Image: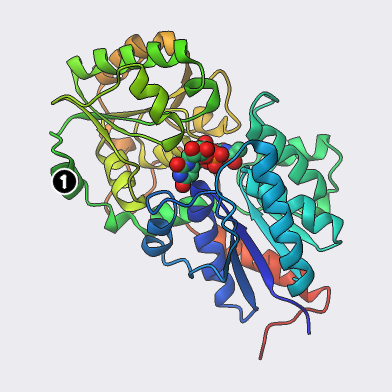
Amino acid sequence: MPGPILHVLGARPNFMKAAPVVRALQGRGLEQMVVHTGQHYDERMSDIFFRQLALPKPDVNLGVGSGSHAEQTAAIMVGLEKLMLDREPSLVIVYGDVNSTVGAALVASKLHIPLCHVEAGLRSFDMTMPEEVNRRLTDQLCDLLLVTSPEAVGHLAREGVAADRIHFVGNPMIDTLLGNLDRFDVEATRADLGLGEDYLVVTMHRPANVDDPDKVRLLVEAFTELSRRTEVVLPLHPRGRARFEAAGLKSSPTLHVVEPLGYLEFMALVRGASAVLTDSGGIQEESTVLGVPCLTVRPNTERPITITHGTNRLIEPEDILPAVGAVLGAGRDASERLGKDGLLPSRVPPLWDGRAGERIADVVQEWLAARGVQPRS
Ligand code: UD1
């Protein structure tokens, strides 16, 4: 009997990518197992996403928790090695670029278990980012590389990945976005948070932004100044909390510093926002589809399609005030916003159409069938 397809999830951005893939494969009669490494463990960083996205409760939670990169990745690897030896999966599927992704990839590859990467081939070309290290190494080890954006195919080809391993399938995170549009209740979320009609959403958690106290001070000054011009809502990732608080970040009537939000509440906030100021990867993509202006506080992006096709712009921390001022001054082009009927704005990237999960299931099913793994009849 061939073993199950093993999905390895660990951190918040994995969950919205995996949900449509798990669901599509459920319809194919293939045995699957969901493993949560426990890299993220707070209710608001993990459990709420499983409930809201109807992800099956993990079959196993390794409970690795936080630590240095080496500690966390090592704990992920030790836990997964035991599990993979025990369950002998027919295929391991990993998502995105977090430590759980690369940990799982190393284990599967050394056990000669076939490996599939969803969101392969993105490159920031910035090796100071842990995510860039994670995605480059993962891609080198994969049998199946599933790509969300056309330029990723070129990156992989230049790194010597054989063309028959690469499949351009579209973006499963956008499946989750489009599939939940009707559940994003902008008014209810605004009311819950005490927000008026015009507001800016801010998220900031990357080491490059939140680990340097000088930069954090600059950011706090910018957020405070912004809140004199418009309402600001800032769901705070646990990573930066202590440094932001030490630098004097606190709520005021127009600066709402709140706990991390669930998927539905956060996306409702973004949908109704005048603009988003962020250093997240996923939000660059989600704001592109929602047609909400996005200012990304980073020197580079692994998602350039959100600039060429979408609403994204890269800015330096020093440029936050003029950049936000310009965006708010320009107003929103209503025609570019996603309609309630689910019609996409004209410039959405190719195959970000809500059907990536099914295409991924097609590729996986065919790949397994060619190796003798058939659905249960
Ligand atoms: C991880 C990913 C990053 C992703 C982010 C999304 C890596 C290297 N980074 O970063 O790419 O953008 O997730 O959220 O995998 N913490 C909690 N509760 C939790 C989880 C974390 O309090 O449930 C705190 C701990 O203090 C921990 C810190 O956040 O040390 C960082 O967590 P970690 O998983 O190491 O990385 P993230 O910054 O969350």
Where does the image place residue 251, in percent across and percent down from the top left?
A: 21, 26
**Residue 271 lies in quadrant:** top left
Colour convention: rainbow
Foreground residue among 239 and 311: 239
Question: Which residue is label 1 attached to?
Answer: 192
Residue 167 visible in the snapshot:
no
Q: Amino acid at mark 1?
A: Asp
User: Residue at image x 82%, y 73%?
Assistant: 370
Q: Is residue 253 above or below residue 18?
A: above
Where does the image place residue 51, in percent across and percent down from the top left?
A: 38, 64
Residue 307 visible in the snapshot:
yes
Numbered disc total: 1
Foreground residue among 176 and 131: 131
Where does the image place residue 284, in percent across and percent down from the top left?
A: 46, 34
User: Residue at image x 29%, y 49%?
Assistant: 265
User: Residue at image x 81%, y 63%?
Assistant: 113
Determine the secondary structure under disc 1: helix
* Mark 1 surroundings within 10 Å by alpha-carbon count, few (fewer than 14), some (14 through 19), many (20 or more): few
Q: Is 93 left or right of 200, judged from the image as shown?
A: right
The quadrant of the picture occupied by the N terminus is bottom right
Where does the image place residue 44, in percent across and percent down from the top left?
A: 37, 50
Foreground residue among 34 and 278: 34
Q: Is 239 left or right of 356, judged from the image as shown?
A: left
